[in-house]
Image (tube, rainbow, N blue to C red):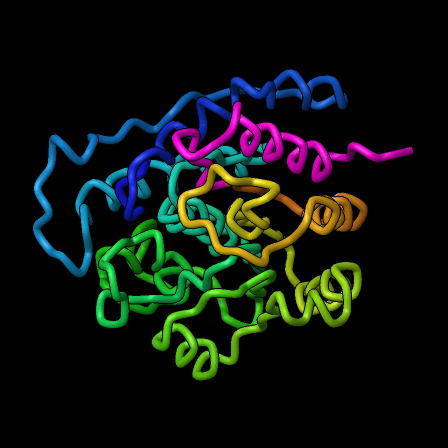
Amino acid sequence: MDLGAGRRGVDMGPSAIRIAGVSEKLRALGHTVIDEGDILTKPPEQQKIRNDKLRYLPEIVRACTLLSGRIEKIVTLGGFPLVLGGDHSIAIGTIAGLSSYCKRVNKTLGVLWIDAHGDLNTDETSPSGNIHGMPVAASMGLGALELTSVGGDFKKVDPKNFVLVATRDLDPGERLHIKKQNINIFTMEEVDKHGMAVVMAKAMRKLKQVDLLHVSFDLDAVDPSVAPGVGTPVKGGLDYREAHLAMEVLSEAGKMSSLEIVEVNPILDNHNQSAEFAVELIQSGFGKKIL
């Protein structure tokens, strides 16, 4: 799906990640992999924008609702959901499914959000009306009811169990939400000052009490020199090793229970470089080590 984004192309991200061998490389690490295929969406050409502040809202809600049900079923059966995007609006569905499961079995959900952006806009604060800038806000119960009620009309994640990492591009409304909700955030400035190992250690301490840990990795968290093919590139991101270290720390902690990789845009990529890097990150998260 690329309906939540400002430019076309990220709907081809899942195919690019598959072409880069994600299933085969996970099986080589000893994992059992079931590819459940895509959740299909209508392209923009087949739709009308009914609300410029919430572009393509009905189709995004439909897709996220389907994804929410799929995720809840996988977790209930004891599986590990690996979600391939697509633009970051899909996280509304992923988190809704995980949260519905947690609510049903009385567990606590935590979210580690690795992203250049805060994705904390609402229809009232978004400068673009693009819903891929709203999934964090929606998951915290902020913004349009259609988005906050995907998977059930309740707050999907408590701000105290949410951590932003590698952030470097925030809108004014997002800064207000971060302060008002007291959201845990480690910007690129902190990565520069203290190093990725320290930042990840602090992030994991913030999330130590949660039962399920979802990791949402927007590839634009990484510098465009490493991953040029992303939906919204921003200079000054994580370098190759910093990104891998984040995933290696998660693997070593053994706490990650679901993962999504989003915003791979093959149109802007060089010879599938970004999708191949995404697969390498997934491998690190699933246990691949240097030694």
* Residue 242 coordinates in the image, percent (x, y): 72, 51
**Residue at the far bottom in the pictured view:** 180
Compare residues 207 and 79 and report the one nearer the observer: 207
Residue 247 sits inside the magenta stretch: no
Residue 264 sits inside the magenta stretch: yes
Q: Is residue 72 visible?
A: no
Q: Which residue lies at the image location 25% right of the left edge and 31% below the top edge?
A: 41
Q: Is residue 224 above or below residue 20?
A: below
Horizontal side of 200 relative to 86 (left or right) equals right
Q: Quadrant of the N terminus?
A: top left
Residue segment shown in magenta: 262-291
Please tell me in which quadrant of the rendered image residue 90 appears: top left
Q: Which residue lies at the image location 51% right of the left edge and 49% below the top edge?
A: 220
Compare residues 201 and 153 and report the one nearer the observer: 201
Q: Is residue 155 above or below residue 68?
A: below
Q: Which residue lies at the image location 59% right of the left edge and 44% below the top edge?
A: 225
Q: Which residue lies at the image location 54% right of the left edge and 46% below the top edge?
A: 224
Q: Is residue 288 visible?
A: yes
* Residue 62 coordinates in the image, percent (x, y): 24, 40
**Residue at the far right in the pictured view:** 291
Please tell me in which quadrant of the rendered image residue 282 appears: top right
